[in-house]
Image (cartoon, helix red, strand yellow):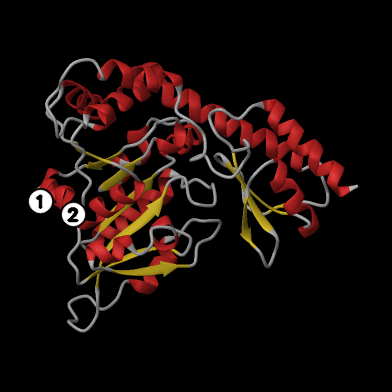
Amino acid sequence: MKKGFASDNNSGVHPAVLEKIALANKGHEKGYGEDQYTAAAVTVFREKFGQETEVFFVFNGTGANVLGLSAVTQSFNSIICAETAHIEEDECGAPEKFTGCKLLPVLPEFGKITSEAVQHHLKGFEFEHHSQPGVISISQATEMGTIYQPSEIKALADLAHRHNMYLHMDGARLANAAVSLNMDFKEFTKDCGVDVLSFGGTKNGLMLGEAVLFFNSKLTANVKYQRKQSMQLYSKMRFVGAQFLAYFENDLWKKTATHSNKMAGLLEKEIQKIPEIKITHPVESNGIFAEVPKEIIEPLQNRFPFYIWNEETSEVRWMTSFDTTENEIHEFVALIKEFLK
């Protein structure tokens, strides 16, 4: 496949991660998480987020979101999220199927939902004919590449907690958000009132595997059973644990996310010089959304694959990755200019 800007999922595995997987492949280890690599990875997560943090490894982001949401809901609950949220748009109804909950989408502003917008759905409490609001779910970074500020997260957490609800964060691109905010993970998650966090790494150099973090152990009474029942318990879990050890070692996560964010910033800077193209959202992580003349989209895609986000407005999405190069950015921009002539 041609290298392009379609998705940070399309990039390969970072060499340091592959090395750690190879190291974990020597000899035998107990399965289902009872191995030294999983234990060591849990220790690192607790060093980052606090000793009371409960950590459950899963295969993928959808599995992480479903497991985290299942742990804090009953089937009569509803989950409030952005219309653009991954759980609403890109998980094939898995959250609704496995939790039984109703998703209540909110119109976002540049991918983010606000306390004011959420208020519309905070009704029907104790009314048996109405689904009971149970969770507010946000993505950090958002699907539009924007970043929630800590104050925005805290406001949503406080709102949720005032109504005996929980705040869930989909952190598929959490590293990109941390770099953008110049903060440690804990500062804009647990410290801001997040209850459940899907911690991702696949989009930032890992092969597979995500982590579901709970900051209140009372929420985890049944999670190990829910993980098994939802087919997210990996028998050879050492290979997930080993990846996270590589991810945190020498702040690899920060180096890879810093690079992908930097490449997005470079692409933004170069695109801003082209009057025929309009960037539609603030570029705060590794995603750029832009309205592009329709006639050049397909020729561009043939050379550098990317996705159309909105066909009606000719809005496209360009994602940069840990292995995107400056040369590729400049080649892409030169091609755009050539096609616009």
Q: Position of residue 77 (x, y in %)?
A: 23, 69
Closer to us: 212 or 307? 307
Q: Using the numbered discs, state the Cα–Cα distance from disc 1 to disc 2 in whole angstroms.
A: 7 Å
Say what amino acid the circle numbered 2 marks.
Ala
Say what amino acid the circle numbered 1 marks.
Asn
Please state the total of marks drawn on the protein image.
2
- Residue at image mark 1: 222
Q: Are marks 1 and 2 in contact (CB under 8 Å)?
A: yes
Closer to us: 163 or 80? 80
Q: Quadrant of residue 270?
A: top right
Q: Position of residue 118 (x, y in %)?
A: 39, 66
Q: Which mark is residue 71?
A: 2
Residue 232 vs 111, above or below: the answer is above
Tell me if mark 2 has few (under 14), some (14-19) or many (20+) residues whose alpha carbon lies within 10 angstroms of its own: some
In this image, 259 relative to 158: left or right?
right
Residue at 18 percent across and 36 percent down: it is 235
For the N terminus, the image quarter is top right
